[in-house]
Amino acid sequence: MLFDSIVYGPIRSRRLGVSLGINLMPTTAKLCTFDCVYCECGWNQPVSHPQLPTREQVREALSTSLIALSSKSPIDVITFSGNGEPTLHPDFLSIIQDTCSLRDQYCPKAKISVLSNSTQLERTEVVEALLLCDNRILKLDSAIDDTMRLIDQPVNAQLTVEQITQRLSIFDGDFILQTCFLRGEYQGQTIDNTTPEELTAWYKMVDNLHPKQVMIYVIDRATPLKTLSKVPSEEMEAIAESLRKKGVDVIVSA
């Protein structure tokens, strides 16, 4: 499923409420530094000259949508997600600045959220942009390298969990950690980030990062890898409860 416009929705998000989405990636193909086996946008496709929307096009599209929505039911959040990794856009900082200004003008109660895989946090302007947002929702699907690479299929095959967590530590806990729990098989390898070994490592990672909130969820839409299955809701609640006993704020979408 690819988003065919810059601005889409509003849609009711399982985790964020009524969300107006913004897609900074091409409308004809996914462009991402991960190639997650569960991504609703499908697999990455070769794109020699990706056509990204300009800063001006994003501002105009968002302004038009917010003006149209101002007389209707209010939105809860403006969410940067779409067909890939939003922080890849070269004008990401300027676009976030424009979004903050338009939000303040037309829907001051709405939050600005970014769903990101954290791979661009070495860029100072990306960190600066994320600090302007209300919700920095940063994913990490396993605390074990082999499993992370199996699930998320990073373009940089040498990427490690330690590198990601070091980048996440920039925010000193002021971010939302997002993890998808799933099971399946890929190229003869078993996928399961709910084993005792996996969960022990994941709980330790959460303790070290101390995010302000943790979002855990299961696959909900068609996935490019057809062997995947949902983790039962009772198991998801048990995972959440283990964190809640430590005082962690957890949202479960199961």
Image: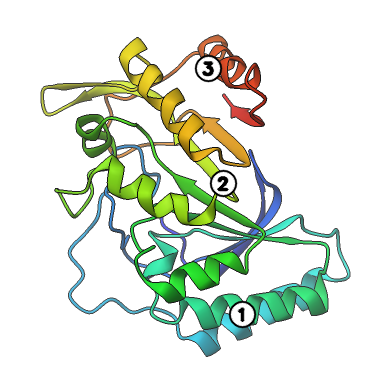
Q: Position of residue 238 (x, y in %)?
A: 56, 11
Marks 2, 1: nearer the viewer: 2
Q: In the image, residue 144 lies at what x, y percent?
A: 27, 30
Q: Residue at x 49, y 66 (%)?
A: 23
Vertical comparison of 181 with 133: above or below = above
> Which residue sits at x=38%, y=45%?
165
The residue that disc 1 covers is: 97
Mark 1 / mark 3, whichever is N-terminal: 1
- Expressed as whole percent of the image width and height from the top left, the position of residue 249 reads 67, 31
Q: Is residue 227 visible?
A: yes
Please tell me the numbered disc located at residue 244.
Answer: none
Pointer 3 local density, CA inside 10 Å: few below 14, some 14–19, many at least 20? some
Q: CA distance from mark 1 to mark 3?
A: 37 Å
Q: Indicate the secondary structure of the residue bearing disc 1.
A: helix
153, 247: nearer the viewer: 247
Among the two numbered marks 2 and 1 on one chain, the one whose residue lies closer to the N terminus: 1
Three-letter code, disc 3 = Ile
Vertical placement of residue 204 versus 2, above or below: above
For the point 81% across and 69% down, which residue is it?
107
For residue 173, the mark is: 2
Q: Foreground: 225 or 199?
A: 199
Which residue occupies 67% across, 55% down? Answer: 19
Percent across and percent down for residue 192 are: 30, 20
Which mark is on residue 239? 3
Quarter where residue 13 is shown: top right
